């Protein structure tokens, strides 16, 4: 049963109920095992953080920063800050020095918690330009501090500091702040990574969280028996709100510390629930296709047939709330107890409850595959500004492939110019931190938040079209939706990243980052001998191979939407050079700037060859 009390009190209320039961779990890399943290210990750590922050003089609604990958300590600091009415501001663990300096100064942060060596070094490097920063508090005791650093402390020492002051006075202040806790206070400021321009601090209140928990609890079948795997960064509103929702239910949170280890973590903790983005499931889909391709003829045949039957069973009948014909039902049940069951066990998902998925469009192929594997993918739509969920698939109601589900209770929707989705409700942000002009541009006088996404409703379900600002218009006047084309390409296991070029151009072209490992294996097996990736990406046989795959992938597109020319890139788009955001979304403007000469050459060569 959900405990939807104020977040400042949640962990203590749950500790009273669950005591020594495990609340959190994480892999200890030194001993190679998962360790549990009980609700009682969780509550004790949270209280210690609150007292230590009060000892440092943290004021009501003061901003506290957390610059770390997922760790239990993130949650200790979050809820410790909430306990004294402070505001928790998470930074992505991969943030650059410039991004960290901007957020520190914008939010006037005095105390910054950092995770490991990388975050410490970035934070220390900007200390001189951080106007208000007084202290860095380091989670990992293995971090080596700079010899010139006299202002940082380790987390354990920080917790001991709370014992040095006047405990009675601190205790009285703590009790007063607990009593004064309210739902209008700011809880978080989440800086959006932004595909263009400077980051914006989205303000989130305790009231937004309370409403979000209420409406999600009404439609999602969660319980204290669920096991969550926290895979996305806690900085991401999807994972943050999802984790907090799980804590209100008493579900175990298994914290994946290193993103690259997620598949190993799945096999070790056997989660019942995990929030993820479509790209994760695309990778799983590609891995299964890989397995099929490398298996025997009979293995390929059986897996393919099992997934085809499972996909048909879900898409034609189960998703629509209809009863499947007896023959199909029996066929599906047989596969579900054999081949598909083995597939789920291989993934570590044999205890699956449901898997919320949002953050981008889910391709029909991937959605069908996940359901065919007997995994209940709950597709949804949300933004940081809406505290995540706006809509999602609802158990017991028909699901149309390609939709992003049904609106949650309390959200109003209407459609503006260019079919832009406008939202209003208790989960919508009050605005952007210290950016009144930007807030007024996003939230109109009637309280409607302008999402920038185009969409439409049909039979009670919401469908997305495209980011309005991402629609390209060719020089021939045709509109192109680049993300739709890109999502088709990256379904192919040989495509790692893809960026479409079309705006004000005569035709569509693409910059493609291949999966180098697979491409090198292909070259080896086809006796393609080259010196380095650059030569490999320009080899005629490789270009012919990719041309054929692109033609297959885009065969259902209109003529003007099809990629006419492309370039294979010898190095990937990265966060380090600014081409990807912290949530791995492509910054198109930066990519176009970095590859301007190459893009111009694509069209110049086409012009010279008489292409159009």
Image (cartoon, rainbow, N blue to C red):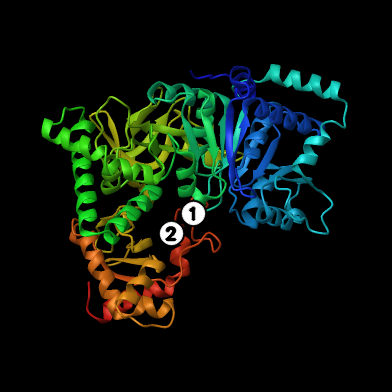
Relative height, residue 599 to residue 481 (above, below) = below
> Is residue 112 found left or right of 283 in the rendered image?
right
Residue 419 placement (x, y as % from top left): 31, 40
Q: Earlier in the sequence, mark 2 or mark 1?
A: 1
Determine which of the numbered discs, if any, sits on residue 196 in the image.
1
Residue 579 placement (x, y as % from top left): 49, 61
Q: Can you identify the residue that label 2 sits on?
A: 588
- Distance from the alpha carbon under mark 2 to that under mark 1: 8 Å
Relative height, residue 323 to residue 542 (above, below) = above
Relative height, residue 393 to residue 474 (above, below) = above
- At x 62%, y 19%, the residue is 13
Looking at the image, can residue 55 be seen?
A: yes
- Mark 1 residue element: loop
Mark 1 nearby-residue class (10 Å; few <14, some 14–19, many ≥20): few
> Is residue 406 found left or right of 257 in the rendered image?
left
397 or 12, which lies in front? Answer: 12
> Is residue 45 found left or right of 503 in the rendered image?
right
Residue 96 placement (x, y as % from top left): 61, 56
- For the residues bearing labels 2 and 1, Cβ distance under 8 angstroms: yes
- Mark 2 residue element: helix
366 or 187, which lies in front? Answer: 366
> Is residue 409 found left or right of 70 in the rendered image?
left
Mark count:
2
Q: Quadrant of residue 64?
A: top right
């Amino acid at each position: 049963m959900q405990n939807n009390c104020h977040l400042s009190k949640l962990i203590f209320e749950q500790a009273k109920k669950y005591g020594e039961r495990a609340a959190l779990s994480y892999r200890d890399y030194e001993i190679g095992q998962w360790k549990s943290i009980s609700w009682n210990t969780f509550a004790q750590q949270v209280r210690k953080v609150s007292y230590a922050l009060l000892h440092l003089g943290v004021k009501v609604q003061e901003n506290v920063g957390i610059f770390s990958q997922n760790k239990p300590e993130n949650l200790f600091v979050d809820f410790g800050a909430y306990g004294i009415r402070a505001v928790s501001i998470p930074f992505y663990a991969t943030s650059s020095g410039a991004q960290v300096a901007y957020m520190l100064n914008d939010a006037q942060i005095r105390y910054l918690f950092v995770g490991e060596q990388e975050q410490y070094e970035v934070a220390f490097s900007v200390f001189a330009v951080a106007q208000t920063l007084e202290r860095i508090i380091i989670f990992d005791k293995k971090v080596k501090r700079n010899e010139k650093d006299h202002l940082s402390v380790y987390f354990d020492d920080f917790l001991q500091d709370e014992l040095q002051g006047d405990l009675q006075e601190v205790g009285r202040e703590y009790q007063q702040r607990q009593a004064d806790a309210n739902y209008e206070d700011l809880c978080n400021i989440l800086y959006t990574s932004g595909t263009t321009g400077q980051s914006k601090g989205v303000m989130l209140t305790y009231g937004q969280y309370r409403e979000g928990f209420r409406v999600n609890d009404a439609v999602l079948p969660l319980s204290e028996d669920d096991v969550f795997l926290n895979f996305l960064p806690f900085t991401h509103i999807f994972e943050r709100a999802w984790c907090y929702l799980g804590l209100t239910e008493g579900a175990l949170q298994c914290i994946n510390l290193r993103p690259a280890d997620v598949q190993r973590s799945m096999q070790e903790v056997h989660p019942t629930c995990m929030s993820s983005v479509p790209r994760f499931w695309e990778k799983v889909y590609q891995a299964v296709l890989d397995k099929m391709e490398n298996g025997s003829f009979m293995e390929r045949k059986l897996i393919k047939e099992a997934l085809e039957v499972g996909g048909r069973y879900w898409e034609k009948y189960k998703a629509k709330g209809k009863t499947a014909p007896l023959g199909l039902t029996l066929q599906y049940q047989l596969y579900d107890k054999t081949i598909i069951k083995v597939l789920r066990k291989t993934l570590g998902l044999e205890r699956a409850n449901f898997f919320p998925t949002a953050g981008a469009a889910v391709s029909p192929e991937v959605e069908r595959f996940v359901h065919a594997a007997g995994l209940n993918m709950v597709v949804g739509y949300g933004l940081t500004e809406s505290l995540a969920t706006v809509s999602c698939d609802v158990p017991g109601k028909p699901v149309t492939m390609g939709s992003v589900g049904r609106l949650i209770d309390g959200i109003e929707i209407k459609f503006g110019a260019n079919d832009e989705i406008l939202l209003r409700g208790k989960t919508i942000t009050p605005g952007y931190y210290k950016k009144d002009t930007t807030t007024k541009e996003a939230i109109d006088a009637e309280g409607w938040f302008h999402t920038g996404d185009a969409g439409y409703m049909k039979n009670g379900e919401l469908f997305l079209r495209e980011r309005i600002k991402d629609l390209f218009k060719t020089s021939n006047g045709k509109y192109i939706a680049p993300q739709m084309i890109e999502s088709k390409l990256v379904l192919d296991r040989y495509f790692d990243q893809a960026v479409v070029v079309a705006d004000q151009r005569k035709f569509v072209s693409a910059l493609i980052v291949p999966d180098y490992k697979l491409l090198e294996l292909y070259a080896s097996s086809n006796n393609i001998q080259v010196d380095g990736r650059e030569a490999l990406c320009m080899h005629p046989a490789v270009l012919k191979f990719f041309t054929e795959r692109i033609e297959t992938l885009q065969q259902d597109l209109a003529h003007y939407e099809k990629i006419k020319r492309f370039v294979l890139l010898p190095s990937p788009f990265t966060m380090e050079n600014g081409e990807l955001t912290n949530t791995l979304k492509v910054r198109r403007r930066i990519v176009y700037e970095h590859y301007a000469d190459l893009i111009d050459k694509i069209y110049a060569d086409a012009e010279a060859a008489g292409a159009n």
